[in-house]
Image: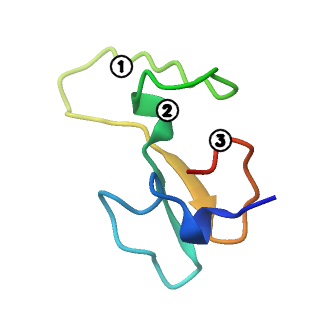
Amino acid sequence: MDTCKSCLWWGVQFDTNEDGMSDCDFIDTTQGDKVIRIDTVVADDQGLSVRLMTHRSFGCNQHT
């Protein structure tokens, strides 16, 4: 299985941090069958956001 380190969707918005973590942008697309879903509810006006962070060695069947 391929890992995040070589995936088109990984690390698009944020550089990899010192722990080898970065963001996965695949969850924001409409491509392919979805196996990941993140629902978020924010009830204030603080500008909060949620993103899927994975390690560069994380294996994923949605690798591109």
Q: Nearer the viewer, mark 3 or mark 1?
A: 3
Residue that lies at the very extreme toward the bottom in this rendered image? 18
Three-letter code for the amino acid on which mark 3 is drawn = Gln
Q: Nearer the viewer, residue 1 or 23?
A: 1
Q: CA distance from mark 3 to mark 1?
A: 28 Å
Quadrant of the image occupied by residue 25: top left
Amino acid found under the numbered disc labelled 2: Ile
Q: Quadrant of residue 54?
A: bottom right
Disc 3, disc 1: CB below 8 Å? no
Could you tell me which residue is drawn at 74 percent across and 43 percent down?
61
Circle 2 packing at 10 Å, graded few (<14), some (14-19), many (20+), is some
Other-residue count near label 1 (Cα within 10 Å), few / some / many at <14 / 14–19 / ≥20: few
User: Disc 3 or 1, which lies upstream in sequence?
Assistant: 1
Numbered tag placed on residue 27 in the rendering: 2
* Residue depicted at x 62% and y 71%: 56
Q: Which mark is residue 62?
A: 3
Q: Position of residue 19 (x, y in %)?
A: 58, 80
Q: Identify the mark at residue 42; answer none if there is no mark.
A: 1
Distance of label 2 from label 3 (alpha carbons):
10 Å
Q: Quadrant of residue 30?
A: top left
Task: Kindly identify the amino acid type of the residue bearing the numbered disc 1.
Answer: Val
Q: Where is residue 46 drawn, in percent x and y?
A: 20, 32
Query: Dot 1 lies on which element?
Result: loop
The reply, left or right, for residue 42 in relation to residue 6 is: left
Residue 6 at x, y = what percent? 56, 69
The residue mark sitting in front, 2 or 1, is 2
Q: Which is nearer the eye, 18 or 9?
A: 9
